[in-house]
């Protein structure tokens, strides 16, 4: 089995467990992965409580931003949420697009899809649907969405170039995305980079901020904007599961850091010749 397949299996296993837990249980672990002893919800997740369309039962505390707040969604838009989980951001987006719009959530974890669909059924939302699939091969036709959002998910995808290529493909010409994600500055200690548990916990799967933004540029997106940036401080008791006391001190003294960012970018209104999108 390829390393990327091993990581995907790990993520599916972890998030299948998370789907059966409450938000409170997930907040006691780093990104819901179960890899940490005690972590305050504010370490990664942000507060949705005052956001229009928020459904508490669909909020598992797994995000690292509020991408829908920055996504410039309009009434009647079609929105795709990458890694939609229990549907939290989809229901927030639905409150903006209204009855004339459409929201599509995509997630590779069956348990999450089932949970999200049950919420949509209870609310009788016939314009919110959830599809089982991977971000590197989205089960969505080309040029479908006005807006793509995602919340702390692409860091878990092994092939980030392909993930952004798929995002580009499903966006309409002139469409845009707003994605919240975890990125790095400096060099993480090797022990953290190699820790599978920390991968599922949204840390070791992250790449440098510079590489992340460069991947977006190379995909063909334009008007890239860093909408928000927030440093995340991982508690010592988490890090000491992977680092010695000396390694922890060296990490603290280094320029390495973990950040939550929200990035905006647009698909050109007219794409490259021969692409079929103009």
Image (spheres, rainbow, N blue to C red):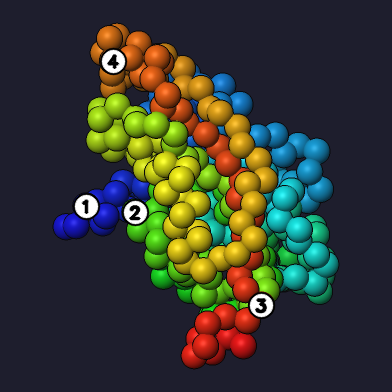
Q: CA distance from mark 1 to mark 3?
A: 37 Å
Q: CA distance from mark 2 to mark 1?
A: 9 Å
Q: Nearer the viewer, residue 56 or 69?
A: 69
Q: How many neighbours does mark 1 have within 10 angstroms: few (below 14), some (14-19), or many (20 or more)? A: few
At x 31% / y 46%, what residue is drawn? 10
- Secondary structure of the residue carrying numbered label 3: loop
Q: Earlier in the sequence, mark 4 or mark 1?
A: 1
Residue named by callout 4: 247
Q: Which mark is residue 253?
A: none
- Secondary structure of the residue carrying numbered label 1: helix
Residue named by callout 1: 3
Q: Earlier in the sequence, mark 1 or mark 3?
A: 1
Residue named by callout 2: 158
Q: CA distance from mark 2 to mark 3?
A: 29 Å
- Secondary structure of the residue carrying numbered label 4: helix
At x 40% / y 44%, what residue is drawn? 207
Q: Position of residue 55 (x, y in %)?
A: 72, 46
Q: Is residue 61 visible?
A: no
> Along the horizontal axis of the image, is 22 left or right of 190?
right
């Amino acid at each position: 089995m390829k390393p990327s397949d091993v990581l995907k299996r790990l993520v599916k296993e972890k998030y299948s467990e998370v789907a059966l837990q409450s938000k409170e249980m997930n907040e006691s672990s780093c990104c819901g992965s179960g890899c940490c002893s005690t972590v305050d919800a504010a370490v990664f997740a942000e507060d949705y409580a005052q956001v229009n369309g928020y459904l508490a039962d669909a909020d598992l505390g797994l995000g690292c931003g509020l991408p829908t707040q920055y996504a410039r969604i309009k009434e009647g838009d079609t929105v795709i949420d990458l890694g939609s989980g229990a549907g939290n951001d989809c229901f927030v987006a639905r409150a903006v697009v209204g009855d004339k719009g459409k929201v599509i959530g995509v997630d590779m974890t069956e348990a999450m899809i089932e949970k999200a669909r049950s919420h949509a059924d209870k609310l009788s939302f016939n314009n919110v649907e959830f599809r089982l699939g991977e971000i590197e091969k989205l089960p969505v036709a080309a040029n479908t969405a006005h807006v793509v959002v995602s919340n702390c998910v692409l860091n878990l995808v092994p092939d980030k170039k392909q993930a952004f290529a798929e995002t580009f493909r499903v966006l309409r010409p002139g469409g845009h995305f707003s994605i919240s994600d975890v990125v790095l500055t400096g060099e993480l200690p090797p022990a953290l980079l190699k820790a599978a548990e920390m991968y599922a916990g949204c840390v070791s799967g992250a790449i440098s901020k510079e590489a992340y933004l460069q991947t977006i540029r190379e995909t063909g997106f334009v008007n890239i904007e860093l909408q928000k940036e927030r440093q995340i401080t991982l508690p010592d008791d988490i890090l000491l599961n992977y680092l010695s006391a000396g390694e922890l001190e060296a990490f603290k003294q280094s320029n390495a850091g973990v950040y939550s960012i929200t990035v905006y970018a647009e698909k050109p209104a007219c794409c490259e010749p021969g692409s079929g999108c103009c």
